[in-house]
């Protein structure tokens, strides 16, 4: 006589559900990443073709405040100094001979 047994239903533990969710999320991210990079590349091309800054060489005794006032005399120097710091990832000081990106005069 042959006896057949039915398999018990599969039950996922909390750890298993988390692992399955992580796997699904990974698959989605892998599928979406190329699309994001295509759109990011398109926006970078627009930025590269539109000139938003030019380069200057820091002279001995130059300060960010003086540079900001000279390149944008009609704007608040505090805003221009902030933009220069952001564009160049500057900390505190300037070194003569360094090249700085500065915003175009608007």
Image: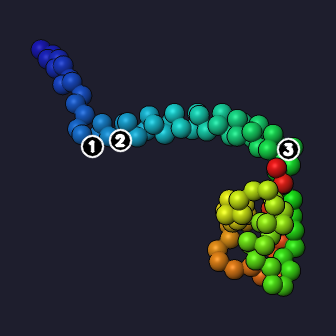
Query: Mark 1 or mark 3, which is nearer to you?
Result: 3
Name the residue at the bottom extreme.
60
Q: Secondary structure at mark 2?
A: helix
Q: Quadrant of the N terminus?
A: top left
Can the viewer see residue 86 in this picture?
Answer: no
Within-10-Å neighbours for mark 1: few <14, some 14–19, many 20+: few
Residue 60: x and y, percent? Answer: 84, 85
Mark 2 and mark 3: Cα distance apart in space: 46 Å
Where residue 87 is drawn, which disc sits there? none
Q: Quadrant of residue 14?
A: top left
- Residue occupying the point 37% across, 36% down: 21
Would you say 96 lies left or right of 35 here? right
Would you say 20 lies left or right of 31 here? left
Can the viewer see residue 23 in this picture?
Answer: yes
| Relative vertical location of residue 2 with respect to residue 67 in this rendering, above or below | above
Name the residue at the front extreme.
74
Q: Mark 1 highlights which residue?
A: 15
Residue 6: x and y, percent? Answer: 18, 19
Residue 25: x and y, percent? Answer: 45, 37
Would you say 53 lies left or right of 21 here? right
- In the image, 74 versus 60, the foreground residue is 74
- In the image, 51 versus 37, the foreground residue is 51
Q: Mark 2 highlights which residue?
A: 19
Q: Secondary structure at mark 3?
A: loop
| Relative vertical location of residue 103 with respect to residue 98 in this rendering, above or below | above
Within-10-Å neighbours for mark 3: few <14, some 14–19, many 20+: few
Q: Mark 3 highlights which residue?
A: 50
- Residue occupying the point 82% across, 50% down: 106
| Relative vertical location of residue 97 with respect to residue 79 in this rendering, above or below | below
Earlier sequence position, callout 2 versus callout 3: 2
Q: Quadrant of residue 37?
A: top right
- Residue occupying the point 61% across, 39% down: 33
């Amino acid at each position: 006589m042959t006896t057949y047994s039915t398999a018990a239903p599969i039950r996922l533990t909390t750890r298993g559900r988390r692992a399955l969710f992580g796997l699904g999320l990974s698959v989605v991210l892998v599928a979406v990443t190329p699309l994001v990079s295509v759109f990011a590349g398109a926006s970078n091309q627009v930025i590269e073709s539109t000139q938003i800054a030019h380069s200057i060489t820091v002279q001995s005794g130059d300060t960010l405040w003086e540079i900001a006032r000279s390149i944008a005399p009609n704007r608040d120097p505090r805003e221009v100094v902030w933009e220069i710091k952001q564009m160049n990832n500057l900390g505190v000081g300037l070194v003569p001979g360094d090249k700085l990106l500065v915003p175009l005069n608007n």
